[in-house]
Image (cartoon, helix red, strand yellow):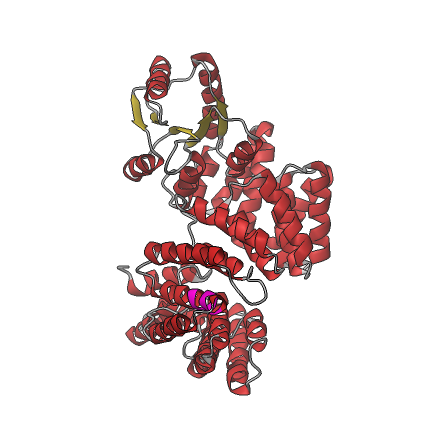
Amino acid sequence: MLDYSHKRFLIVDDFSDFRTSLKAMLRELGAKDVDMADRGEDALSLCRHKRYDIILHDYNLGAGKNGQQVLEELLIGKLISHECIFVMVTAESSQAMVLSALEHEPDAYLTKPFNRASLSQRLDKLVERKTALQPILQALDKQDSSAVLAACASLSQQDKRYAPLCLRYQAGALRELGRLDELEKLLTALLADRTVPWACIALGNLLQTRGQLPRAQQVYELALKSFPMFPGLYDGLAAVLSAQGEGKRAQNLLEEAVRLSPLAIRRQMQLGKLALENDDFGIASKAFRSAVEQGRTSCFKNPENYLGLTQALTGQAVDGSLDKRLQLDINQTISELQKTYSNDQAVQVRARLAHASSLVLSGDAAQAKKLTEEAVARLAELESFFSAEAAMAVASQLRELGQAEASDTLLKNCVEIYGDDPAVMQGIALQTSDPAILGSGLQALELNRQGVRSYQQGEHGQALEHFRAALALQPKNISMALNTAQSLLRLGGEQATPALLEECRACLEVVRIMPENDPRFARYQKLRHKAFGDE
């Protein structure tokens, strides 16, 4: 039996008798530092102030966060290190619960009841594994992908038992380092030997990113023949089919994934979006409703789920008329959305437009007009801009509600901010053919492309000039502002002139309009930290 006297334990369970019993077991194993909590929220609070070595967390805690949601939040918030052992404990054994819990990969899954001997045996194996993997896990905590690769190579040579685990860590490190050719070679070689679900998903994602959709589809389809109970494979294949325009097949796959593992809020949200695109408003309503309900205690809570549910309910109007039952459901959804996100002015605008669209179908044109006018007035007061997808949705709603001028203004801003994205431009072109809107960014796009090429070739001074010229033409464009800021910081590092630093900060002030859910937000934060130092 291992020495647990220096390990810090956290027990989370809503039954006091079980907490006391489990603590006694740990004491018998030599544990001295054992904390307890009966709610997921309390567990998170404890983890914010103390680093634990081993967490034994019950899955179902009644009202509030469940074990899966706590684990998600611990990982996203980096409240536990990679060396921490997280054991999911439960008396439940339903397929839906087990698959949902295992998808988030706790270190172990322990079914009640168990005795001290079985607990000791399980913990000993987990500690032994974490100890062997320690150099890799410490490198992961430091976000040092090169060190991860070196540690993987060393451990694979020292102990062949850990070679399969090392391959997975190695694949992640190669992806983080952008060494994609090496990653593809590693995954292809592994899958030629045996079918491994995580490797299939990794290769499928890589191939999709590279535009090799038929090959990615083949990878997922072959994997599903061997692992039909693995929901992540359905997700991957659905994404590939959707990218190929096969939205209905993609929806069917996600419906199967949700049937297997319904307690995954992001999967429910994706199913809702696909169903909306397919005008399957019944499935969309069911999926978004599940996402809303799960989101009440999840860190993945998202206003898009409320808005999606509202759109799906509105889509169920018959012959252009919305019955009272549906309108009541919409009113309740909108009310909860506005209350939950009372400080988010962009959400408040979208909530009013969604409500107005439903009221038009309910025959309340006067109230619909009032809400629309309130939304238009609030648009001018927004401190940050919408995401590209949200901006196009709002523009479409404004046009449908008789606000063509406001719609065109929003689309023009969208071009200025996101016009370097071809997919965004295609979406805008579906709403307008106005050359004053669509043609304003072409020269800036070419200058930005030239800047990227120069930067990649190490011609940083030339790259900066291209980026500056592009940004001058499209002063609200996020990518161009970030590119200019990065080039200025690169030259600032070499020349350290206050003028370059001040120009960089001005570029980053432009980017403040970016919503936090934009995938470039992390890059913006890193550049801002370098430019401002104290933030």
Instruction: Point out residue 409 in the picture as x, y percentages from the top left corner.
Output: 44, 80
Per the rendered image, the range of residues in magenta is 355-360
Q: Residue at x 64, y 40 (%)?
A: 197
Of 141 and 148, nearer the camera is 141
Specify the quadrant of the image occupied by residue 193: top right
**From this viewpoint, is residue 389 visible?**
yes
Instruction: Point out residue 220 in the picture as x, y percentages from the top left corner.
Output: 69, 47
Q: Residue at x 42, y 55 (%)?
A: 333
Q: Residue at x 36, y 73 (%)?
A: 370
Of 132 and 76, nearer the camera is 76
| Vertical position of residue 191 compared to residue 376: above or below | above
Magenta-colored stretch includes residue 34: no
Of 119 and 4, nearer the camera is 119
Instruction: Point out residue 466 in the picture as x, y percentages from the top left corner.
Output: 48, 79
| Vertical position of residue 353 compared to residue 436: above or below | above
User: From the viewer's perspective, is 156 left or right of 378?
Assistant: right
User: From the viewer's perspective, is 229 left or right of 173?
Assistant: right
Specify the quadrant of the image occupied by residue 330: bottom left
Query: Which residue is most to the bottom?
Result: 436
The quadrant the C terminus occupies is bottom left
Instruction: Point out residue 1 in the picture as x, y percentages from the top left corner.
Output: 43, 14
Magenta-colored stretch includes residue 358: yes
